[in-house]
Image: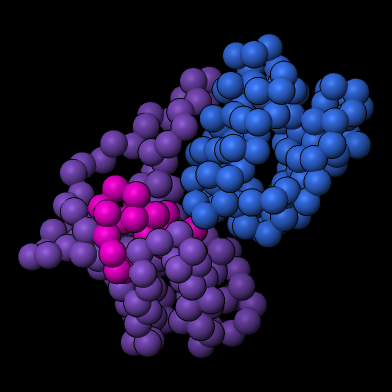
């Protein structure tokens, strides 16, 4: 278990997730860490952006658990409940402007689960680190 | 966001960006691009070659102005990001099939 990260729920503060993820992945060595970090950062960044944009959170916590084969990132916030997947259908000929966050997260993870807690939200994203290149 | 530079030549306006195009930078970029459209500059080439991270909010700023440019008879086209963490969001959402992308500013200016 790596040290957790707590940030204010704003777009500038959430940039700390990138360097934090690289420290989480450090045990894998620089080559694998570099190969994995970008796509995992995008997923975490999209989830955090949803928390800020739609959940009106004030604080976001990130916890990571790294094993030989997988990385689990748990994002918790104090925001409003998630109210369903409003992801757009992907029709490039009719481009939509927003709503791709969860589509991107689902594409980048092995699984993503949601739990509503007493005073916030909990998202668990699992990444199969063997399958990332 | 301050673009590295924005120049108009041969009725094509070029906007060069660097570093991150994420939720923090999306709003100022949207305003910069909308400003060009309000001036009647509806052919805009955005250079993403020096950008190293794009998220869906950054993508949305480009898509919004691409749609507005096209509805004004122009287009918003891109110089392809070189960094894999910048092109990834386009591929995941298939917007790499929607935008016209070039390998360089020169290619965009000569091929448009």
Residue A47: in magenta span? yes
Residue shown at 76% from the left, 40% from the top: B15
- Residue A104 in sight from this viewpoint: yes
Magenta stretch?
A: A42-60
Residue nearest the observer in this picture, A44 or A27? A44
Quick check: B76 above or below B51? Answer: above
**Magenta run includes residue B71:** no
Q: Does A119 appear above or below B40? A: below
| Quadrant of res B33 | top right
Q: Position of residue B53 (x, y in %)?
A: 61, 57
The overriding secondary structure of the stretch rendered in magenta is helix
Residue at coordinates 85% horizontally, 41% vertically from top-left? B104
Residue A126 position in % (x across, y down):
34, 65
Tell me the quarter of the image containing the N terminus of chain A: bottom left
In this image, B76 relative to B24: left or right? right
Residue A48 location (% of width, % of height)? 37, 59
The answer to which quarter of the image holds residue B50 is: bottom right
Q: Is residue B96 visible?
A: no
Instruction: Choose between A114 and A67: the one closer to the eye.
Output: A114
Q: Is A12 left, or right, of B111 in this rendering?
A: left
Q: Residue at x 50, y 26 (%)?
A: A95
Identify which residue is drawn at 68% across, 12% down. Answer: B73
**A118 left or right of A76?**
left
A42 relative to B20 in the view: left or right: left
- Identify the colour scheme used: by chain
Q: For chain A, what colour was chosen?
A: purple
| Total numbered labels | 0
Quadrant containing the C terminus of chain A in the rendered view: bottom right
Chain B shade:
blue
Q: Position of residue B71 (x, y in %)?
A: 60, 14
């Amino acid at each position: 278990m790596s040290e957790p990260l707590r940030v204010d729920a704003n777009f500038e503060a959430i940039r700390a997730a990138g360097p934090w993820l690289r420290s989480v992945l450090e045990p894998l060595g620089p080559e694998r860490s570099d190969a994995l970090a970008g796509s995992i950062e995008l997923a975490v960044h999209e989830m955090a952006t949803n928390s800020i944009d739609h959940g009106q959170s004030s604080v976001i916590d990130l916890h990571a658990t790294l094993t030989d084969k997988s990385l689990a990132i748990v994002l918790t916030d104090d925001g409003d409940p998630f109210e369903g997947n409003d992801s757009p259908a992907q029709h490039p000929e009719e481009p939509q402007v927003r709503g791709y966050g969860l589509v991107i997260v689902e594409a980048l993870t092995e699984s993503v689960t949601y739990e509503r807690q007493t005073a916030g939200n909990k998202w668990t994203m699992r990444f199969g680190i063997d399958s990332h290149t | 966001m301050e673009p590295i530079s924005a120049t108009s030549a041969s009725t094509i306006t070029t906007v060069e960006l660097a570093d991150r195009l994420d939720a923090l930078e999306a709003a100022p970029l949207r305003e910069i691009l909308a400003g060009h459209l309000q001036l009647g500059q509806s052919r805009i080439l955005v250079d993403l070659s020096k950008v190293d991270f794009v998220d869906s909010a950054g993508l949305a700023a480009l898509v919004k102005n691409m749609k507005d440019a096209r509805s004004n008879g122009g287009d918003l086209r891109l110089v392809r990001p070189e960094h894999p963490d910048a092109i990834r969001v386009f591929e995941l959402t298939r917007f790499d099939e929607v935008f016209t992308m070039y390998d360089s500013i020169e290619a965009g200016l000569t091929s448009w």
